[in-house]
Amino acid sequence: MALSWTILGGKELLAYAEGCKVSIFTSCGQEVSVLQLDDEVHCLSWCKKDGRLALGCRGAVHIYTPMSESTDAPNDLMPTHTNTLWYKYKSTFDLAMAVSDEHECATDPGQPAEEAHEDEPKPKPVPTCIHWNVMGDRLVVGQGSLTLWEDAALRPPKRTKDTPSWRAEQQHTGPKPEHEDWEKVMERHFERPIRCATCGPDGRLVASVAQEAKEVQLWFMEVIQPILDPGKNYDFIPDPTTRFATMPLRHPVPICSAEWLRKDLYKGFGSNVLMTLATDGVVRIWSESSMQETLTFHLSTVLTNDCSVGGVVHWLETPYNLAPQSNLLDYALELKKAEKEEWDREEGYQRASTMAGHPMRHRSETLPRHPEAPGITESQSWVLMLDVDGGISIFLIQGLADLPRRTPKVLRTVHIPCAVPAMSPFLWEQFYYDPLLNAAYSPSHCPASCLDRHWGAALEPQQVVLFLKTPNAVEK
């Protein structure tokens, strides 16, 4: 079973996969689409940019794209039941595909070359986790190895002697291509399967954790400038080359989970923040340093609430740090439209007054700043901790994403013992939450809510809703 949540067109959607069937629900529990596949779905992920859905099956990843109701349904449309949302098949790529030769990391330096045996078919890899980057042109897939895939159709052309930079950019401009051409650009093997892999909020970093590993591997692109001989003449300057480098975040005990703090697209937090949970029950929060020359992380905050083995922690995404949100997007569009109208009026008044021989300036009112956090001078980040005994704790961390750096302040605002029935053990992959839903989630195949409907009042006006996967159903 797998769960994934996103916001598409201002509406919250939940994708729930069980076996070969993927059901898509709205926040009020309405089933809007069903995808029936031939293989079992092991993991799935929404693209935050355009709502595409990546489904990880044995040996392959299938990508579906949303379609409006007015568009005619093509022959390859897969949903068998839909009310307001159509999803059509987009593309598929084979997980056993070799790494593209165009990249520096065409082969894993730590993996010995394997002898080819045509009579012995290789087993198809089973993906354990999958995640989109913020731009929607890359996918990180965790399996027996960590692989990074890139849509070559969106990649700008390389500069050559016959194709200078301005011509390459001119050829690349235009509408987005309809087809997708996925290529494997990185593959790194580990001794154990990948437990979790996730792209950073700004697309620069990828965090991966292997099973029973005591360190988080942070992957990033290292740019290598070309070496030029000053005594030679060059027809064109070659582009810098890139290679994948890694930086470990070491822990004293094995790591259970790792999750990035999502950045706000409008406020623009200046650093990446990663939260990890280890088997010792300690939650460690790592912050990226403000140095631009090198990539460094430091341990900024530690939550020692003795979260027992099997518990889970997640960032609680509030309207202060969640993006994109429909209200912020609407405000940004409204502000942009108002600024354009003001500019047109200003230019028209100045032109008319100049022609009349009486220069005058017209000053119109603009929209006020969006009241995201009135009276708040420090950034606020919320952490939710769920223990195996059913207890819930919510922490408020102030000043975590502020620049210049300061020591964050940690406050435990809510503690609810035995809020949900004790389930032993919890798996962090089998936990889902949505703090922005006020409507009940009650599809027909799900049981009644096992949470007290009054407990979320501590976070007014937001209400926390939990989705816990059981062997037979989803409990809210």
Image (spheres, rainbow, N blue to C red):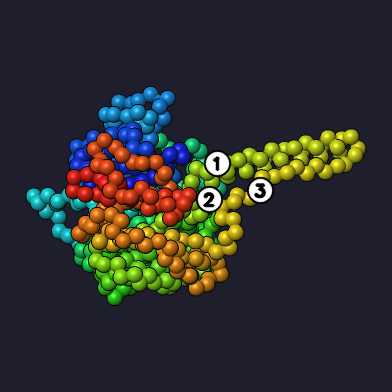
Q: Residue at x 24, y 54 (%)?
A: 421
The answer to whether any part of residue 260 appears in the image is no
Q: Decide which of tag 3 and tag 1 comes sooner along the chain.
A: 1
Mark 3, Cα crowd under 10 Å, few <14 / some 14-19 / many 20+, is few
2 or 3: tag closer to the N-terminus? 2
State whether residue 421 is above or below residue 71.
below
Cα separation, mark 3 vs mark 1, equals: 14 Å
Location of residue 418 in the rendering, given as x and y in whole percent from the top left corner: 28, 59
The dot on residue 165 is 2
* Residue displayed at 32% across by 66% down: 277
Q: Above or below — where is 177 with respect to 269?
A: above
In the rendering, at what x and y percent does residue 305 appear?
34, 70
The relative height of residue 131 versus residue 336 in the rendered view (above or below) is below
Residue type highlighted by circle 1: Asp
The amino acid type of the residue labelled 2 equals Ser
Amino acid type, label 3: Pro
Q: Which residue occupies the foreground of this view, 376 or 331?
A: 376
**Marking on residue 368:** 3
Is residue 333 shown left or right of residue 313? right
Q: Which numbered tag is attached to residue 300?
A: none
Tag in front: 1 or 2 = 1
User: How many numbered markers are drawn?
Assistant: 3
Q: Quadrant of residue 287?
A: bottom left
Alpha carbon separation for disc pair 2 and 3 = 41 Å
Task: Give neighbour class at mark 2: few <14, some 14-19, many 20+ (Cα, 10 Å).
Answer: some
Q: Secondary structure at mark 1?
A: helix
Say whether marks 1 and 2 touch (CB < 8 Å): no
* Residue carrying label 1: 330
- The answer to whether one can see residue 36 in this image is yes
Estimate the x, y position of residue 205 in percent, counting from the top left: 40, 60
